[in-house]
Amino acid sequence: MPGDVPRETEERLAQLKALVLAESREQNLISESSVVAFDERHLADSLQLAPLLPAGVLVDIGSGGGFPGLVLGCVRADPCHLVEPRAKRAAFLDGARHALGIGDHVHVHGCKVERVTLPPVAAITARAVASLDRLFTMASHLADDETLWVLPKGQSAASELAEARKTWQGDFRLVASRTDPEAAIVLATGVRRRRAR
């Protein structure tokens, strides 16, 4: 279990792990190859985003098995909205948030992010969902100039960011991943579509 978390949080993350592994027998929440390295691949990988996030409402796009959204919901008291269009996965997330005792501030939207209506949020996360260009297109209605996008992108981070800059402008930077020396996290604020010249 990842260190540097209070005992109550550690117990909650252990419970989340048990829930995900049990549900993975029913539906493909995580890859078979990632089970052995579960703590590093799913828990630590999600937890590294927490210190990067501002206070306020968080939206996690494509929450799937709960990474990073459910993990962040376990360590943050701020409202957290998990967006998952696949019905079985959304049902799992809904059951898990109640089982983990975080149902008061973690909410599940069983739809595509384009259909979610919220005022501009403090932060948006998404892990292994879509290209940066596609993410900005899908969810820009949930953001304003202050919204921080925190997007783990793996080894393709720099090339994806270069591609996205052709269509989008804003303040972009890359932060090294703590769990994969070859991966990076894209941080972005003030994201807006470039005007055609």
Image (spheres, helix red, strand yellow):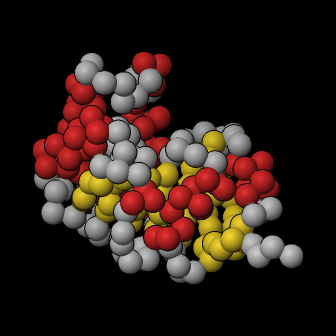
Indicate left or right for 125 with 110 as reference. right
Residue 74 percent coordinates (x, y): 27, 54
Q: State how many labels appear.
A: 0
Residue at (81% x, 73% y) in the render:
196
Residue 108 percent coordinates (x, y): 27, 54
Residue 35 percent coordinates (x, y): 39, 23
- Which of the image's four quarters has the C terminus? bottom right
Q: In the rendered view, would you say 4 is above or below 116?
A: above
- Which of the image's four quarters has the N terminus? top left
Indicate left or right for 19 with 39 as reference. left
Residue with the most extreme bottom position: 145
Quick one: 13 or 94, which is closer to the camera?
Answer: 94
Tell me if residue 55 can be seen. no
Indicate left or right for 189 with 85 as reference. right
Residue at (22% x, 33% y) in the render:
19
Residue 72 percent coordinates (x, y): 35, 55
Residue at (43% x, 77% y) in the render:
120
Quick one: 116 or 104, which is closer to the camera?
Answer: 116
Tell me if residue 89 can be seen. yes
Which image quarter: residue 161? Answer: bottom right
Residue at (75% x, 72% y) in the render:
194
Q: In the rendered view, would you say 13 is above or below 26?
A: below
Which image quarter: residue 103? Answer: bottom left
